[in-house]
Structure formats: C-alpha cells, structure tokens
Image (spheres, helix red, strand yellow):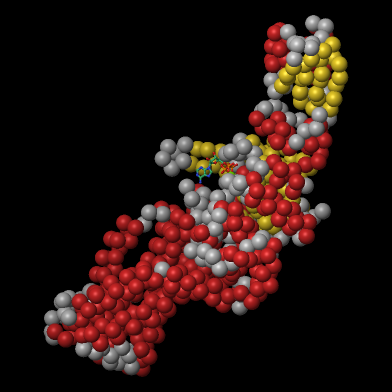
Amino acid sequence: MEKIIEVRGINKQYVKRKTKEVITAVNDVSFDVHRGEVLGLLGPNGAGKTSTIKMICGLLQADAGSIHINGLDIKKKRLKALKHISAVLEGNRNLYWRLTVRENLEYFAGNRGLSRKDVKEQVEKLLKQFRLKEKENELVNGLSRGMQQKLAIAVALLANTEVILLDEPTLGLDVEISYELREILKMIVKEEKRTIIISSHDMPVVQELCDRTIIINKGTVVVDEKVENLLKLFETRAYSIKLGGTLSVAQEQQLLVKFPLCTYEGSSHETVVNINLEKSEDIYDLFDIFKAEGTVVESIDRTTIDFEQVFMEIVKGEKAYAMA
Amino acid sequence: MQWLNLLNANFRKEYIEMKRYLPNTLALLLTFYIIFLAAFFGIMFVGDPASFEANVQYSIVSVAFWSLTLMTMNFIGFSVVTEAMRGTLEQLYMSPMGVWKIMLTRIVGQFSLQLVMMVILLFAAMLTSGQWLSLNPMTTIPILTLTMISIVGVSFMIAGLAIIVKQIQAFLQIFQFVLMALVFIPLSVAPFLAFAPFVKGVDMVRMVMMENLTLSAIPLADFGFLLINSMIYFILGLFVFHRCEKLAMKKGLLGQY
Ligand SMILES: Nc1ncnc2c1ncn2[C@@H]1O[C@H](COP(=O)(O)OP(=O)(O)OP(=O)(O)O)[C@@H](O)[C@H]1O
Ligand SMILES: [Mg+2]
C-alpha cells in the first residue's frame, strides 16, 4: 500500500505562559499511514494525541522532524497539503453556532472554494446519512452535543479530502449517540476509501473501526501494531487459572510482588487467578508460587481479552512492552 | 472561480449574521445616526474656522469617514478574536485557501454592507437637518475604494497582533482616538501625515465633496500617491499578518487555551 502520511521524528515543546515551565508534549514520534487505512491514535490524557494531530494539520509547527502529506511538506506547502486533509478537532467548537445546520455545511464548503451548487447533492446525502435532515434549518446553538458532533463530521466529509482526522469524536457523548456515531463511521469506512486517523479514549471505537493502532504515552510511541495482532498477542498470554483451595498470605504477597496486575477471587475450596503474562516464561515463576505450598492447579484456560484491557496493560501498567 | 465561491460564502455569512443580529445592527445604525445629526447641527467645530457652513460640512465628511474607517480597521482583528474565542479559528486555518483570503473576502463583504448603510444614514441625516452635501459618488467612490485598501492593510496588522495577544480591546480603544486625530486634522496643517495610511484619501474625498469636483479635476499625481500609499500599507499588512500566523503556529496559539 502507498503511504499518504509520513511522520518523521516530530517533537513539540510548549512553554507555559505564566510559569515559563517547558512541557514536552511530543517526543520523537514517527509513523506512516497508508492510503485507505483507518488508524487509531490512543493514549492517556496529556499523551500528546491532539498535538500530533494538530501538527499533521499544520495548525501547530513541529520543533523538529518532518511531516509529509501525499509527498507535500506540511511546513513548506501547507495550503497545498491542506487540499488533502480535513479534520474534526477536539471539543465542540468546529461549527458556527449562529448558523443553521445547512448553512454550516455550505459555509465550510465555500471556504474550500466550492459553490453551493457544487455540493448540493452531497449535502443532501450527508443530511440523510447523519439523520440531520429534519434539523437542517435549525441553529447549531440549539442542537444536542451529539448532533453537533455528527454535523462536524459531516462538514469534514463534505470537504472530500482523502485524509480525515478525528480527534476524540465520541468524547462527552452518551452511550446511545456514541453508538450511533460509531455505526455511521463504520459505514463510511466501509463505503468510502478514505484514510482516517481517529484519536480516542473510546476502546470500542478503536476495536471496531481501526485496522491499526498507535499508542502514545508521555509523548512517545509505545505501540504501533495492527489491532488484530495486538489482541492476539495479548490473548495468548492471558490466562485464567483455577486452583483447588485458597492461597496463603505468603502466596498472595508473592503474587502481588511478581505480578502486580493479576487479580484473584475465590471461596474456601476454589480460587481463580486471572493474569496477563509479560513473557511466556513467566508461567514457570507463577507455578513455582503455587508449588511451594502444594496448591493444586485444576485447570488453565486462555481468556479472551478486549481492547480496553490491552490498553490498560500497556499504558497504566507502565510495563516495558516488547513486541514478540 | 474558487475566489468567487469563497467571496460568495463569506459575504453570505456576514449578511446572515447581520440579519440574525438585527437588534445589534439597528443599535449601531442608531448610534451613527445620532453622531451624524450632532455633526449636522454644528456641535463639532474642528479645523479652519473660516465659515460655519464649511465647518459643518467638514465635520460630516470626517465623521462619516471616521466611522467607516474605524469599522473596517477593527474588522479583521475583531473577527480573528471572535473566532479564537468561539474556537472556530483553527477550523478556518484548515482551509486550503488560506485565512488571509477568507478575511479579505469577509472585509470586502462587510465594507460593502457598511457603505450601503452609511449612504442611507447620510441621506437620512441630510433629510432631517436640511443641510445638503454633494456626495458626488462617481468621484468619491473610486477614491474611497483606493483609500480602503490601505485601511485593510492596517486591519491585517491589527489582526496579526490579535492572533498573538488575543486581548486587543484596550489597544483598539486607544487606537480609535489616534484614528480620529488622523481623520480630522487637515493635511494643510500637517502635510507629513500624507505618508500615514488613508489620510491622503480622506483629504481628497473631503475636497471632492466640499468643492464638488469631478474625477478628471483631480491631479494624476494625487491619485498616484494614493495608489502607492495604499499598496504599501496593504502589502505590509499581509506580511505582518503572515509572520504572526507563523509565530502562532510555532507557539500553539491558534487554539483555545
Ligand atoms: N497550547 C498549549 N500550551 C501549553 N501546553 C499545552 C498546549 N497544548 C497542549 N499542552 C500540553 O501538552 C501536553 C500534551 O497535550 P495534548 O493535548 O497533545 O494531549 P492529548 O493526548 O490530546 O490529551 P487529552 O486526552 O487530554 O486530549 C499536555 O501536558 C498539555 O497540557
Ligand atoms: Mg487531546
């Protein structure tokens, strides 16, 4: 597949206005995005997702490194490169609140040099697709947060760019609308061959929509892997172990020291230990703990794992993540 | 074609917002109407005290010019600050046309709307007071348009500053008085002011209106001077705006914070 976005060694530091404190938001980040790919950008708060997205849009200039969109250097050929990108930025202010739904669609298309006639058909299609048709003449001001977000995405789609960047598209939406948005996005991914980068905290969004995910933490990339591989990889190391009897206090302590993220629950005659092993060899250490006091291992099962757990393991566990 | 669509979209937006904020627009109109009336009834005595009537006329032209200039000059800066506050500025910066073009089309739209309002106001004021000026539109409008180019330049400079510092309200208030001085002081008193933006144009418009001149009666040298003056300020304005944009992108100042 052909590369459409090339990010090479970008860095970004901010200087806080009041304290003059220097914050490193992005530190030596590199990745490629291929044409037609849907990439998930994950990371905890303050990881540098928004900064990375803004640098790709040219809204923020990287201190070092380079970004190319379709071969165009965003620093030198910003306006040319922008012909290939549209974005829904973080927060809910991507629209004019004092214009109606339709006026917003038409205005932003106009700002890209398109006439109302040029986009007429597509506006109709999008209004239907996003179920905004009956609201088309209402002011954005009065719409719910979910509707506003839908409209913002519709505006970005109307630009007809190859690349669309969505920064936290489901943030602050209730379960229902976030589900609806996910379904719409799924349809778009399926129907149109666009390249999409989605930053999100919403794991189902990433798990269902993305081909590949990049996890950044504290400004650096910690994982860059296909979603299915990532799940598989973790699946093979996630175990549920059933023990006959209870664990002694000493065993519990040893477990917590060696495997701080493992969980266990049980009754007087049975205990289930859930554990994600970092390395396959760790299973021997685990068994040593049980063997030491003659605890009987009744069964070992691989457990299914969802994306949320994978993310937690990588980021919150702060364990060194080494690709196998 | 792209330019035309851009102009169309932004003109429409300005018009829709003006209509939707009818109370604001009406209040503004009323304010200027009162200012005009005050001028007409000779409350202002500025400039050459040769004759009372000439004085009143001088004031009226100056006030009309001052208000038009003021609104145009603040417009881009105000637009940028409002967009930054509402959080839509970054979305504007996603346009492959460039924000300067968007702002230029907006200011053209805004200026046209204001010009229409101003002419209506002038007529209303003349009607109420019974004092008639020769508006001489065939001559004044070309001069006015040329002059406005320099004002747009200054407007871009202010907007550049606004992107960086955001709080420019206080600055603009002070600037308003500097502007008033520039518009009201006759060139004959301070000839060097011809090098400042728009002062030369104001002087020419005033002369045309008061002495009822035609376009051909104005020396070509005056036009040449006006054109060069306007171009210099316009290009300088765009340059400053561009540098400020670059700085804002380096420091991450385009978003809300
Ligand atoms: N304009 C700015 N000025 C100063 N510091 C900033 C600015 N923008 C971001 N930061 C800081 O840079 C770091 C990274 O921020 P960024 O918004 O890129 O993270 P994020 O991954 O998008 O986080 P979130 O999940 O909260 O949206 C944070 O510590 C943030 O406080
Ligand atoms: Mg963010």
- The residue drawn where x is 72% and y is 22% is A262
Q: Is A271 placed above or below A194 here?
A: above
Image coords of residue B26 (percent x, y): 34, 73
Towards the viewer: A222 or B34: B34
Where is ligand 1, by quadrant? top right
Quadrant position of residue A280: top right
- The residue drawn where x is 40% and y is 62% is B78
Towards the viewer: A273 or A15: A273
Q: Is residue A13 left or right of residue A208?
A: left
Towards the viewer: B41 or A68: B41
- The residue drawn where x is 43% and y is 73% is B19
Image coords of residue B113 (percent x, y): 42, 77
Q: Is B86 placed above or below B39 here?
A: above
Q: Is A12 placed above or below B138 here?
A: above
Image coords of residue A152 (percent x, y): 60, 58
- The residue drawn where x is 54% and y is 58% is A143
Q: Is A49 placed above or below A128 here?
A: above
